[in-house]
Amino acid sequence: MTRLALVAIAVVAQFALPAYADVTVKSQDGAMELAVPNGWHEVTPEGAATKLVATDGHGSRVIVRVYSKEDFKDIKAVANFTATGFKLDDAQSKSEDVQVNGKPAVSMNLTGTEPNGLRLGLVITVFEADGMYIGVIGRAPVSVFTKQAPVLAGLAKALKITPVAAAATPAPAPATAPQTPPRH
């Protein structure tokens, strides 16, 4: 009987839908794509620096932004700039040097209270790619942050960046040989 039960479980498991299937969101220019957990959906980004935004519909969100290397001293400066943009009162932060796809990065976890009273947890990861700084910001209400923090932290490694080819310039028209007039 035990053997029959194991076979039945194996058959059911083979045809069951996966409990966790990623959804892929892409930037408008096609240069970035991010696999987010099942149930998340894309939100329209606001501002030129914001390339991707996705949410789980329950308060957790990921935002991918690009920053010019000329504007910042290093990746730590970008992480600090991003963190201060949230204007959290009583912010408590912890940052560490990490690697994202083999590249040096800074990861910052912080919690604090927004001016409207909402307590947030943030995971900010910044790294360099294609001559710019990339910031992957994951946020969630404090009530679910402990559960969501590993997911939010992993999103930076899930980001795929494809260099966008420069717009192809049309090839010059081939030179035409002088035509001789038809003979009659």
Image (cartoon, grey):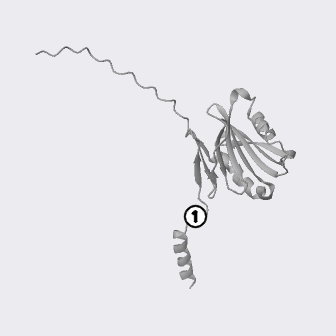
Give the vertical position of 148 relative to 165 (above or below).
Answer: below
The x, y position of residue 31, in whole percent, is 57, 39
Residue found at x 69% / y 38%: 127
Say how many tags the image has: 1
Looking at the image, residue 165 lies above or below residue 24: above
Q: From the viewer's perspective, tell me whether residue 126 is left or right of residue 178.
A: right
> Relative to residue 68, is residue 178 depicted above or below?
above
- For this orientation, the residue located farthest to the left is 184
Q: Quadrant of residue 80?
A: top right
Amino acid type, label 1 = Pro
Report x, y in % for residue 156: 67, 45
Q: Which residue is mark 1?
A: 18
In front here: 126 or 143? 143
In which quadrant of the rendered image does the N terminus lie? bottom right
Q: Nearer the viewer, residue 138 or 49?
A: 49
Single out the residue that lies furthest toward the bottom.
1
Residue drawn at 51 percent across, 32 percent down: 165
**Mark 1 element type:** loop
Extreme residue in the right direction:
90
Task: Name the one closer to the observer, 132 or 95.
Answer: 132
Vertical position of residue 153 compared to residue 39: above or below:
above
Residue occupying the point 61% across, 33% down: 130
The percent coordinates of residue 180 (x first, y second) are 20, 14
Image position of 142 (left or right of 105): right
Picture coordinates of residue 118, whole percent (x, y): 82, 52
- Quadrant assignment for the C terminus: top left
Other-residue count near label 1 (Cα within 10 Å), few / some / many at <14 / 14–19 / ≥20: few
